[in-house]
Image (tube, rainbow, N blue to C red):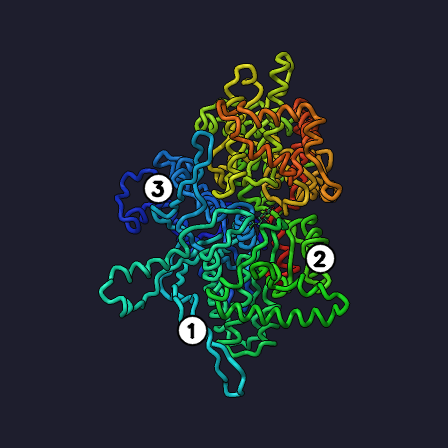
Amino acid sequence: MNEPLAESEAPQARNSALGEDALWHILYSLGRDNAHPDKHKCYWGLVLAVRDRMLEKWASVQRQYYENDDKRLYYLSLEFLPGKFLRENLLSLGLESEAHTFLRKYSFSLDQIMDVECEPGLGNGGLGRLASCYMDSMATLGLPAFGYGIRYSYGLFRQEIRNGRQVEMPDNWLHEGNHWLIPRPHGLYPIRFYGTVHEWQDDDGTLRHDWRGGDIVMAMANDMYVPGYRNGHVNCIRLWEARPHKEFVLSSFNAGDYIGSVQEKIKDENISMVLYPSDDAPEGKTLRLKQQYFFVAATMRDLVRRFKKLNKPWDQLPEKNVVQLNETHPSIAIPELMRILLDEELICWEDSWFICQKLFAYTNHTILPEALETWPVELMERLLPRHMQIIYEINRRFLEDVRLHFRDEPDLPSRVSLISDGPEKVVRMSHLAIVGSFSINGVSALHTQILRDRVFHDFIRIFPDRFNNKTNGITPRRWLRQCNVSLSWLLSEHLGCDWVTDLDQLERIRELADDEEFRHDWEQCRLTNKKRLADHIEKRNGITVNPHSIFDVQAKRFHEYKRQLLNVLHIISLYNHLRKNPEVMMQPRTFIFGGKAAPSYWMAKDIIYLINCVARRINSDPHTRNVLKVIFLANYNISLSQLLVPATDVSEQISTAGYEASGTGNMKFALNGALTIGTRDGANIEIGERVGQDNIYLFGLCEQEVLDMRNRGYDPWELYKNDGELREVLDMINSDEFTPGNPTAFSGIFNSLLSGGDRFMVLADYRAYAETHQRIAHEFGDRELWIRKSILNTAGMGFFSSDRAVREYMDDIWGVKPDV
Ligand code: Z15
């Protein structure tokens, strides 16, 4: 059903050659001379030619969904991080060689052409990238699935490093237009904010509600297409854009102020203007809640519109549809559907609620208390008055039930209430999502266990059957086949091409770990990738790195729980060791960092500054230069990740145990043959089980030990006193060692680790971390041993394919079937 086709057999939508179509488009769609197309023209011409082929398939697939009366999946996410499209789409559609033929005529390589493409940064990190991996797998499995999100005008900021500090620059990704995105200016939906709720009685005397007045903003669809891997299937991600209400009347009391009234309306476009740049810590701004409701309301309109075309009774809505909520961000969908059913379709409460609870499923991605989303009741009452009423009623009925079933636990209702009483009443969005969904899942075995034991412990007893685990996965198309061409060739040479859609096939290279020639080829592939990264570093940072050194990479958002600090502390101590023992032989190491900090997260930004100051100092020291380099790569994004991942020897996954829900970077590195140094956190544990404990470096406190230690009363000053090496490092940070003339530059960091109590147990794990690194350096020197371990990592990573993850969602939660 899903056999990958050889390129020549791949379904061809158009008869003419891709290159001819590209030339045609340069003239007739772009309106530019196509006689001697430059890089830009070739790129955009190709995009349009590829798009034609996708659109034909998409149209026939949509038709098929109707004809086969398929159950549809709606994947709602405030973030998507698809990465660059052209290479991926060529690969999926089997058009790579045709594209090469076209480009060769004009002496361009696909790499050069890809420089023209900008990357849509419509997400912050793991959560957004996961959504994109899942969209890829859904298309490849042939699922009737629809992605929904926002078409932000500005994606995540571009990061520049100036004088060692992060500077945020706007990401105006649409400034040249973007033909991967098709705007649909017809059939816009009106979305209401504010206003008032009116009561009326229907013919049976039932009390009804009607939300009126307020402001109307229009939602316009922009569609992005996702082709499956060589299966002729194409799905769509619909991104909503805010537009001013088209029939706005320049209000009479504003008469005379024409410009002022127009400006007032233009403000409505703010809603889809910019992505909120914090990962894992909501900002609680009105505009953010507006974004959430805006995209959810438009999406539910689409769902209801399509369902009505089927002419089926309402109780069949959940038989024909399922809505997956990516985090609580879209959970306002639950009261929105209630509002549509109650107020517009005039269905009774019981039936409406029954439908809702069978439609929605919720994925939780974090247990960080500060990341659990809440909204002030006062704000919600103003912005979405009808939804607030509905939430109160959901809560009233829910708590009544709880009181009935748990009579001897008088505290339980207030703990599980959707509304928390504090100094300020807030709606707990996770409680809303739990009560309104038939499935609640965590994203790794440990994370789901923590949800059960701690975070949602009360709810487990109330809804024991709703909770389940779906360990995250990544798409092997982008994260191996595309980003690691040399290794992909080697794999296909030995395994055939099926591994691209059947990643468990990688198991079959296990026996080749004993084959010396294979190990040699493996090492050559890795070296090619490392040299490519070394060239990039030379170009970007002006620093020469040794491709034979250990490439040790920590690339992810900056957050205290991810503990980039632990990594730097260790680097400084290595540096001290080298300076004190100039004659010592040390395995050359290159430490590479990448990642953005939320613009308002001062501690994270200080950590970036510290890394850059330490890098400047170490890289310019002639005594250590040949064995130790520290590189900070600016503006970490999907494209940069695709360069880093295949060139990494050691992958840093060192979050405080219990805090990283899953991690997905960990999977990308290990799939490409990196060895992981990591804590027993998130999916690291499962990676260890699959690749074998001998082939992963797990260290430090486990989740239970973190809890125990904290309960016993952990004192970081004790470690400071007792560990001389660590103390020296900390004292350096607390002096002007890395910032000459400014001894307090890092006192915030120093204090967070000591007087502040070291919330993330950095010092507690320091010794174990340093010792593990020592082992790694030693084992890296044994080339046979290391390459063997590298091969066994790739061999064991099949489980972490997003195809596996999506299949689990499909079977256990969604109940949708492939339609290919
Ligand atoms: C985000 O990127 C993640 C969780 C969140 O709650 C938010 Cl708001 C953003 C990440 C987790 O930190 C990471 O561990 C996980 O792998 C990823 O989501 C995908 O599940």
Question: Can residue 529 be seen by looking at this rendering?
Answer: no
- Up the image or down, 698 lies above or below 776; here it is below
**Is label 2 or label 3 in front?**
2
- Residue type marked 1: Arg
Give the camera-side residue of 136 and 718.
718
**Measured from the top left, where is residue 444 in percent x and y?**
66, 49
Question: Up-down: is 249 above or below 730?
Answer: below
Name the residue nearer the viewer: 546 or 311: 546
Spatial CA distance of label 2 from label 3 is 57 Å
First in sequence: mark 3 or mark 1? 3
Instruction: Tell me the residue that label 1 is attached to.
Output: 212
Q: Secondary structure at mark 1?
A: strand
> What is the distance, in whole Å, between disc 3 and disc 1 at their CAs?
51 Å
Placement of 148 over or under 211, stated as above or below: above
Q: How many C-alpha atoms fall within 10 Å of the one at disc 1: few (<14), some, or many (≥20)?
A: some
Image position, residue 341 (x, y; %): 53, 74
Q: Which kind of residue does numbered mark 3 sit on?
A: Cys
**Residue visible at 72% across and 26% down in the picture:** 722
Label whose residue precedes the other's in the sequence (2 or 3)? 3
Amino acid under label 2? His
Which residue is under mark 2?
Answer: 457
Q: Quadrant of the image for the C terminus?
A: bottom right
Looking at the image, do the residues carrying marks 1 and 2 touch, with CB atoms under 8 Å apart?
no
